[in-house]
Amino acid sequence: MIALGTRASEIIILNEHRGIITTISVDPLKKLKIISILRTSLGFLAAGSQNMVFSFQKQISEEIIQFNHVRTLTISEETTEIKNIAINASETLLLCSTLTNQLFKALLHSQEILKNDQDLRLEPASQPFHHGAITGMDTCCRKPLLITCGVDKSIRVWNYITNICELVKYFPEESYSVALHPSGLYALVGFSDKLRLMNLLIDELRLFREFALRGCRECRFSNGGHVFAAAFGSMIQIWSTWTFENIANLKGHNGKVKSLHWTPDDSVLISSGSDGAVYSWNIKEMKRENEYIQKSCSYNGAICTPNGKIIYAAGSDKTLKVLN
């Protein structure tokens, strides 16, 4: 017998002598594509879009062959297409590769996959990496944590000592920037409509506060954690972490602000932008202290020495500049 998967959510069972034996529909709405089919000892597995794997068991009754759906396996969190599936010889391990270049697994006990009607979750077989560009990254000083966001609409928290991903959270829209509080307990995330402050829990990112900053492309907590800087467009705003008060608006850039960097004592904030300007801001007086402008270069990042006197900047001219 031959099993064929279609784009109309159907599996067609063929016999070389009798033609089509039966047609199985896995989705009444016909939105699920069947991409991969794998034979097992008691039936077959079928996988496709909407991150699902279906298990079917063969039954023969009065010379009538039927395939009954007995279990569905799903990928937790992520919505994607499953491109290929494989199972080991003893049928104790199922592996799935996805359109987003991820590898998932399900540990099976003997042939229970075809006998038990309880659904299983497919878990990452390796680290659940981003599948697309990483648009933001930050660390904190009190915990060995690294936070990243990307165009795949996910935010991931990594432990750089154990080298594992501790948390993955998907959102309906792409996040542009992310910042981690020095305590490792809070995270700032910039979305197209608002900047959101979230509590970082053991297994969840929970919304705590929203700020009306549209398209925030860069945000950074101060090293003390008492204030944070957020850039949207050409303006930089300084906010209190505890009272949520807008302390100051720093104006000077004529283009988008690309990077923000605090000195260890939080007395100076360094900003760089697409307008070719690198500014040093005195946070106590909330005014611009020093500037370096090269309009032919769009700066992507700038940092400084602990005293804020020497600045290192890199941009579109592919050179690292030392600004004194």
Image: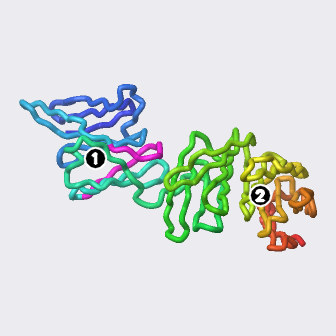
Which of the two residues, 56 or 262, is positioned nearer the viewer here? 262
Q: Please state which of residues 204 and 153 is positioned toward the viewer in this rendering.
A: 204
Give the percent coordinates (x, y) of residue 32.
Answer: 40, 34
Question: Is residue 319 something one can see in this rendering?
Answer: no
Which residue appears farthest toward the front when viewing the image? 243
Hey, which quadrant is residue 49 in on the image?
Answer: top left
Q: Which mark is residue 38?
A: 1
| Left or right of 209 on screen, residue 144 | left
Q: Residue furthest left?
A: 62
Q: Is residue 10 above or below residue 235?
A: above
Distance Cα–Cα, label 2 vs label 1: 49 Å
Secondary structure under tag 2 reads: strand
Query: Amino acid under label 2?
Result: Ser
In which quadrant of the rendered image does the C terminus lie? bottom right
Magenta segment, which residues? 73-88
Residue 223 vs residue 276: left or right?
left
